[in-house]
Amino acid sequence: MKLGRLYFLFMFFIGTTISSYAQKEIEEVVVDKENIVKTSSEYKPLAPARAAFYSAIVPGLGQAYNKKYWKVPIVYAALGTTIYLYADNSKSYRRYREAYKLRIAGKKDEFTDANGNELLSLATLEQGQKTFKKNRDLALLGTIGIYLIQVVEASINAHLLQFDTSRNLSIKPSLQFDQNNYSPVVGASFNLKF
């Protein structure tokens, strides 16, 4: 019975110490030549989800949320290019499709000159339709792909912004010697310091 109480008290104190240590917010002081700045290295678990949500609502907003403003024009340039390609190929597809329908009906189309000479053959009009339709569909897939990539990029970037890049993360090469003949040994090691 006494051992049970002792075990309970031990677990209680261990549990409260661990939980109180886990709730502690770590603050560090950065000393600049002119100012002393107090920063907090607080982990924000919802930041990646929020950045992805913002990017999903308005493309580029997640990048702006991560304070990577230089990426916003790249997102809009990529989306604008694929949307332009989609619209241009769709317009050309409709032109060739309309000319093909008129040609089959025996009427004059835009690819027939004033004398009635056909500038493009029926097979060329059919091949043009296939090509422009394929390019239109690829442009649509490209637009969807770029949209999804920018959402994922905003989320990943928000994760990486919380990654510790302090001076404690460094590479320190060292030379090791063989204990038997004191010659240098080639090798690599990976040490973690907490």
Image (cartoon, helix red, strand yellow):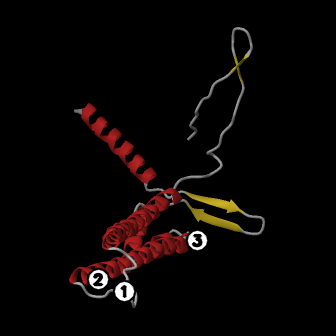
Disc 1 residue crowd, few under 14, some 14–19, many 20+, Cα 10 Å: some
Percent across and percent down for residue 128 are: 36, 71
Residue 194 occupies quadrant? top right
Q: Earlier in the sequence, mark 3 or mark 1?
A: 3
| Mark 2 vs mark 1, CA separation in Å | 9 Å
Q: Is residue 174 left or right of residue 132?
A: right
Q: Residues within 10 Å of mark 3 (few under 14, many from 20)?
A: few
User: Given the image, on which type of amino acid does mark 1 rest?
Assistant: Glu
| In-image side of 68 versus 108 (left or right) | right
Quadrant in the picture for residue 92: bottom left
How far separated are the C-alphas under marks 2 and 3? Answer: 43 Å
**Would you name the residue on which mark 3 appears?**
70
Label 3 SS: loop
Q: Are marks 3 and 1 in contact (CB under 8 Å)?
A: no
Front: mark 2 or 1: 1
Q: Residue at x 32, y 68 (%)?
A: 130
Q: Please tell me whether residue 12 is drawn above or below residue 180 in the rendered image.
A: below
- The amino acid marked with disc number 3 is Trp
Give the total of numbered labels: 3
Residue under label 1, please give it: 110
Q: Are the two marked residues, 2 and 1, in contact with CB atoms closer than 8 angstroms? A: yes
Tag of residue 194? none
From the image, state whether disc 2 or disc 3 is nearer to you. 2
Circle 2 residues within 10 Å: few <14, some 14–19, many ≥20: some
- Answer left or right for 167 relative to 142: right
Locate residue 77 relative to residue 155 in the image: left or right. right
Q: Which residue is mark 2?
A: 98
Dot 1: element: loop
What secondary structure is marked by label 2? helix
As drawn, 28 above or below 68 = above
